[in-house]
Amino acid sequence: MNGPRLARALAAPAPGWTTSADAIVVGSGIAGLTAALELRSRVPRVLLVTKGALSSGSTVWAQGGVAAALHPDDTPDAHLTDTLAAGGGLSDPEAVRVLVTEGPDRVRELVARGTAFDVGPDGGIALTREGGHRADRIVHAGGDATGAEISRALVAQIEAVRDDPGIEVIENALVLDVLTGAPDPDSRWSSLSRPGDPDRSASPSRPVAGVTLHVRGAGSRDGVGAALAPAVVLATGGIGQVFRSSTNPPGATGDGIAAALRAGAAVGDLEFVQFHPTVLWQGMGAKGQLPLISEAVRGEGALLLDVDGYRFMPGQHELAELAPRDVVAHAIVRQLAATSADHVLLDARHLGGDFLRRRFPTITARLLAQGIDWTEEPVPVAPAQHYHSGGVVTDPSGRTSVPGLYAVGEVACTGVHGANRLASNSLLEGLVFAHRAARDVARQVADGGPRRAPEPEERPGPTALVAAAARSRVQRATSEGAGPVRSAASLERAAGVLAGVRTDAHRAADVVADPQAAEWETTAVHQVASALVHAAALREESRGGHFRTDFPAPDPAWRRRVTLALDDDGALREVVPVPAR
């Protein structure tokens, strides 16, 4: 199956300023902040770039907790078993073992960095249970404000060292392209090849040279510039705005995946999109960031009912409402079809008003702002895009197929999640693998690795710019073609719409589009959507966060990752990344 052709660089003005560092971290969620803090004490100069304010990373929005085997009766092996079960046979056991064995220490380090987790009667960290977990191992803060508390603590650590000459923070900076230099024969990764066709290789690995970025607003740097470094750590978060409705913030436009793809990096598992089962239903016209009702609510005993009041989950899975998210989301979609409804109901009234207000203060306030008192009435909910299990393919140290380029957090495909993320593993993944990536960068610097970035080279081929006006068209195509339920026909329609979007808007006299933030973000949305739809069309089975009505069952032949990369001509095709020994 032929993949789409995508430009390998954005249309943008030439950089008007330049800075340099030993390592650049892009993003200020849990993964980016952790990487920057770890690097700051290990390499001479770190540059932290964030799309908005330092405190605006996606972690702030995380209502769920952090999963770690901290209870005396729990074990990393038990956590591993639950994670592999949720992953639908595609999780990498090595990556999962790294997560579950290193996770408890990383959580304790968060406490040492000032994170105030909820405590139990004995004064120890309180542990709860969420969907897919068979033990109490979820750590929360402020009831349902875990992400906000973790972000507060880590941002405070960065703020405390902002006057240190060894770290620079550039806020309100949109990363445009990952810069690369001449091919490096000593790359830590081999070149990429198609399965069964090793002679047809993708683009040779060119080492990272830094990033171009556009800084908005007043400050010491403004406009388009170049930040040069021999190591770049992408921690740019998710792809929520590729879809019409999502729980992700407006800045989750897939910039990191798109930039890595244009730089020659391999991406994998793009087709596995997690649709949160219980997002507040606000009508068919709802779009943008939607409030979610945390998995933890069902973990405490809330029930899912259809519009006739029928509790349908016990007949769908042995864990009922605590089943993995993909199971719950697909069950809701089926129940919607059976009842000709557009939402189901989450009923938590039996838990008691005092408990709900104390345990879930943020959710309570957000629902009241929408005119819903969930202590007195069920909450209308429906699935919406929530988390992306795929991303830029990495090894357990965060290294990608581009030498010097790392990816951590939701932008990465570490192999932990496989076909479906287990609840509350995402914050832990960002924490654990950001720590490992930072240590790997520092180790290479200490071992005499390159201390200066190679000279950036211009990539061949056309540059891309998609008009901001096209974003709703792209989002609709992705949502209707590659939503919770897919088919060959829906994916073909989506691919056709995406192929018809003009990607040379900067050259079109009859299109209003200039190289600026809205157009750059829309170009990333279009490129990620195109790659995601292609990956979903390739995988002719149903598994985890990828469900096709024409192939409704898992197929053992597809118990493998779909990995994609661009060749020198910009053609997207399936490849196999092979780490060097």
Image (cartoon, rainbow, N blue to C red):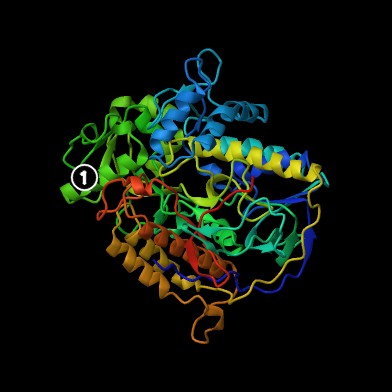
Residue at x 48%, y 63% (from the top left corner): 573
Of residues 115 and 554, the one drawn nearer to the viewer in this rendering: 554
| Secondary element at tag 1 | helix
Residue at x 42%, y 23% (from the top left corner): 135
> Against 327, is 249 above or below?
below
- Which amino acid, by three-letter code, is at mark 1? Gln
Residue 577: x, y in percent?
55, 53
* Image quarter of the N terminus: bottom left
Q: Is residue 341 left or right of residue 274?
A: left
Residue at x 56%, y 15% (from the top left corner): 123
Of residues 73 and 332, the one drawn nearer to the viewer in this rendering: 73
Q: Is residue 147 visible?
A: no
Q: Is residue 581 visible?
A: yes
What residue does disc 1 label? 335
Q: How many marks?
A: 1
Residue 94: x, y in percent?
53, 35
Q: Is residue 181 left or right of residue 137?
A: right
Quarter of image, res 556: top left
Residue farthest toward the bottom in the current orientation of the protein: 509
Residue at x 46%, y 58% (from the top left corner): 196
Residue 334: x, y in percent?
22, 46
> Against 197, is 419 above or below?
above
Q: Is residue 372 left or right of residue 168?
A: left
Of residues 164 and 538, the one drawn nearer to the viewer in this rendering: 538
* Image quarter of the C terminus: top right
Residue 411: x, y in percent?
54, 50
Quarter of image, res 106: top right
Q: Residues within 10 Å of mark 1 (few under 14, many from 20)?
A: many
